[in-house]
C-alpha cells in the first residue's frame, strides 16, 4: 500500500512539474531585435570567455575531452555529419583543409575534432568577437589554429575551402545579411550545424533565450528560422549536398538541422 501511495505521489508530482512554465529555454515572439534585447539581461562576454578559456585549456592539456558552452566533459561528443563533411572536403582538396570557422569561440570545434583532423594538413581560422580573439591569440593560437577579428582579415591570409557556421546565425541581429556576406566569399563549401527551424513552417521567429545559470547567467535574442526561406537564400549560389538533423531540443516546436552546401559551377 505504501509503495502504491509513493508511486501515485511521484506521478502527481511529475504532472505538477510538467504544468509549470519552463524557466529556461526560448520564449516570446518579438517584433524587433531591440525589443528582444530590451527583454534580455544580456551577457558578460568577459566572464563567458574566461569560462570557455578555462574549459578549453583543460581540453588542450588532456585534462578534459570536450568543451561545449564552457562546460567540460570526460568524453567527446561528435557531430558525425560535420566531421564527415570536413574530411570529404579535405579529400577533394588533396592539399589539406583551410577552414573559416565563423563565430567559432576559442576553437571549440577544432579541439572537438582534432583527433581526426590531425591526420590531414589543416588550417583552422576562427572569426569572432574581439574579446574571444584576444584570448584565442594569447592562449590557443599555433600553426594550425589562428584567430581573426574580421572575415576580411582572415581572407587576406587564407584561401578558405569551407566556411563553418555552428549555432551562430541565430544569435546575430541580421542573420541574412551575414549569410550574404559569407556567400559573397564564394568558398567552395559551406557547412551549417545546429540551425533551429520552426516545425510549423511559420515565418522567422525572434525569441529570447534564457540560459540555465549552471552554464552561465545570461539571456539574449535568438532566432528560429523558416527552413524554406533559409534554403531559398542559399540556393542562389549553392547546391545542397546533404542535410541532417541534430540532437538539440527546444521548448517550442522546432527541429535543429545541419547542411553541407557546394558552390554552384565551382
Image: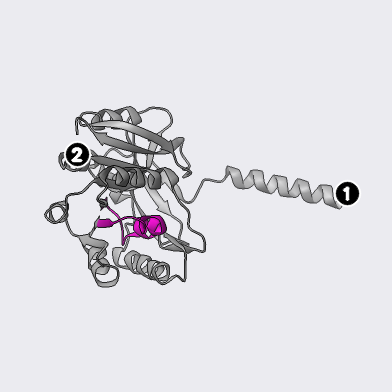
Left/right placement of residue 122 relative to residue 215 reads left
* Tag of residue 183: 2
Disc 2 secondary structure class:
helix
Picture coordinates of residue 143, whole percent (x, y):
24, 65
Query: Which residue: 36% across, 59% down?
Result: 118
* Tag of residue 1: 1
Q: Is residue 64 above or below residue 5?
A: below
Picture coordinates of residue 47, whole percent (x, y):
34, 67
- Examine the rendering and report whether any part of residue 170 can be seen: no
Residue 224, picture quadrant: top left
Query: Which residue: 36% across, 56% down?
Result: 117
Q: Calculate the distance from the C-alpha at mark 2 to the C-alpha at mark 1.
A: 66 Å
| Label 1 crowd (10 A; few <14 / some 14-19 / many >=20) | few
Residue 44, picture quadrant: bottom left
Marks 2 and 1: which is nearer the front?
2
Left/right placement of residue 42 relative to residue 63 reads left
Q: Quadrant of the C terminus?
A: top left
Q: Which residues are magenta?
A: 99-125
Amino acid at each position: 500500500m505504501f509503495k502504491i501511495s509513493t508511486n501515485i505521489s511521484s506521478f502527481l508530482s511529475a504532472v505538477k512539474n510538467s504544468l509549470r512554465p519552463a524557466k529556461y529555454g526560448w520564449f516570446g515572439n518579438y517584433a524587433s531585435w531591440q525589443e528582444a534585447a530590451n527583454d534580455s539581461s544580456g551577457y558578460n562576454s568577459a566572464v563567458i570567455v574566461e569560462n570557455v578559456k578555462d574549459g578549453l585549456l583543460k581540453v588542450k592539456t588532456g585534462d578534459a575531452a570536450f568543451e561545449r558552452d564552457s562546460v567540460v566533459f570526460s568524453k567527446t561528443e561528435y557531430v558525425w555529419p560535420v566531421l564527415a563533411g570536413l574530411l570529404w572536403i579535405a579529400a577533394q582538396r588533396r592539399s589539406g583543409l583551410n577552414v573559416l570557422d565563423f563565430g567559432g569561440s576559442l576553437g571549440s570545434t577544432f579541439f572537438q575534432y582534432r583527433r581526426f583532423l590531425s591526420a590531414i594538413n589543416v588550417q583552422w581560422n576562427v572569426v569572432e568577437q574581439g574579446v574571444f580573439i584576444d584570448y584565442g591569440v594569447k592562449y590557443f593560437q599555433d600553426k594550425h589554429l589562428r584567430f581573426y577579428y574580421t572575415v576580411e582579415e582572415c581572407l587576406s591570409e587564407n584561401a578558405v575551402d569551407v566556411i563553418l557556421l555552428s549555432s551562430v546565425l541565430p544569435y546575430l541581429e541580421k542573420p541574412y545579411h551575414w549569410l550574404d556576406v559569407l556567400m559573397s566569399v564564394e568558398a567552395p563549401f559551406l557547412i551549417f550545424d545546429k540551425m533551429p527551424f520552426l516545425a510549423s513552417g511559420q515565418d522567422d521567429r525572434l525569441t529570447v533565450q534564457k540560459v540555465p545559470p549552471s552554464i552561465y547567467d545570461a539571456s539574449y535574442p535568438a532566432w528560429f528560422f523558416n527552413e524554406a526561406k533559409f534554403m531559398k537564400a542559399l540556393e542562389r549560389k549553392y547546391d545542397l549536398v546533404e542535410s541532417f538533423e541534430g540532437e538539440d531540443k527546444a521548448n517550442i516546436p522546432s527541429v535543429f538541422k545541419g547542411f553541407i552546401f557546394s558552390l554552384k559551377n565551382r
